[in-house]
Image: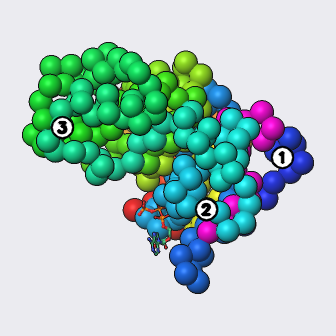
Amino acid sequence: MEAPVTRTATQREAAATAAIAVDDVHFSYGKRPAVRGISFEVAPGEVLGFLGPNGAGKSTTIKMLIGQYRPERGSIRVLGHDVVRERAVVQSRLGVCFEEKNLYPTMSGVEHLRFFGRLHGLRKVDAEGLLERVGLATRGRDRVGGYSKGMRQRLMMARALVNDPDVLVLDEPSDGLDPVSAQTIRGVIQEQAARGAAVLLTTHDMWEADALADRVAFINDGRIYAIDKPETLKLAHGKRSVRVRMRRGGEVEERVIEWSGASSAAALAEATRDGELLTVHTEEATLEAVFIQMTGRGLA
Ligand code: ATP
């Protein structure tokens, strides 16, 4: 198990150009600390995955970021604006997607997007275009009360894009969704990052973090334990192995060689001598294995 990460002077300098800059933020519910000194940045066009189990402090951090809770200590800046003192400016540049709770069952998808656009002070919203993007074009005039969970979540995603945000904050956006809805939402996230939006995405799904995030922050017990590219985390902390299947004299044999240095190549050469090589698979550590190694706790 490792100690939570502390910040260097270089990281503090990077905060100056970041779209999201969170510096040593703390928050408690009553006397119980939920966030204990979290710092990170997200650059424009970057997806940062916030990966951690239930109760790690992900939602609390996000609620401070979007101005719902006030940090007890530390500061949060979005596009250079302080989220507490310059809340209105921050809100106008932010797109937020939480659980699909705040929808009105009697309103249609189109009406939701227009209503939300008016809340942002926008005179015109391309509701049809946004619904098309999340695969709801044919259901836009239907009441939301008749939408499935996946459809409601896709509408929430479209709603988050109404103001063409520079920063997107997404709390478990594809949790519990059918594969088509989850894939639609992931596609939208990738498009938004490609057009330059900074994306902060919380998840307890290591596959989602691995597939979508440019960098992943491991969060546990209100602290960040590591923050880096998924590949770097797996290579630096995980065990890799090579699984070899050979046929020898009519028998199929399987061997797993741990990949840890120069001797591994010799072990592979030895394992594949004399016989017919059937398959070779490299096996990488998963983000969850690395998470457990660093925090002493699983993601479930
Ligand atoms: P989840 O994936 O379950 O939402 P999370 O990583 O988002 O988990 P938080 O919701 O931020 O975690 O919770 C962090 C800690 O704060 C937990 O110990 C949780 O029990 C506590 N907590 C969260 N919300 C409240 C609340 N409204 N009142 C009291 N304690 C809370």
Q: Position of residue 203 (x, y in %)?
A: 45, 49
Q: Position of residue 183 (x, y in %)?
A: 32, 30
For mark 2, what is the residue?
Answer: 70
Front one among 297 and 79: 79
What separation in Å lies between label 1 and label 3 (alpha carbons)?
Answer: 45 Å
**Is 122 placed left or right of 26 in the picture?**
left
- Mark nearer the N terminus (1 vs 3): 1
* Identity of the residue furthest to the right in this view: 9
- To which residue does mark 3 refer? 107
Q: Residue at x 41, y 42 (%)?
A: 97
The quadrant holding residue 161 is top left
- Could you classify mark 2 by the number of other residues whose Cα lies within 10 Å: few (under 14), some (14-19), or many (20 or more)? some
- Residue at point 44%, 25% (across, down): 122
Residue at 48% from the left image edge and 36% from the top image edge = 95
The mark nearer the N terminus, 2 or 3, is 2
- Residue 227 is situated, as x and y percent measured from the top left of the image, at 67, 48
Q: Which residues are magenta?
A: 14-27
User: Is disc 3's CB within 8 Å of ligand 1?
Assistant: no
Q: Left or right: where does residue 274 sit relative to residue 35? A: left
> Which percent across, then down, holds residue 9?
89, 48
Query: Does residue 280 belong to the magenta stretch?
Result: no
Residue 23 in magenta? yes
Q: Residue at x 29, y 40 (%)?
A: 153
Q: Callout 1: 10 Å neighbours few (<14), some, many (20+)? A: some
**Please, what secondary structure does the residue beneath circle 2 have?**
loop
Element type at marker 1?
A: helix
Look at mark 1 in the image and give the residue it sits on.
12
Query: Could you tell me how far apart the alpha carbons at marks 1 and 2 are, in whole angstroms?
Result: 22 Å
What distance separates the C-alpha of mark 2 from that of mark 3? 32 Å
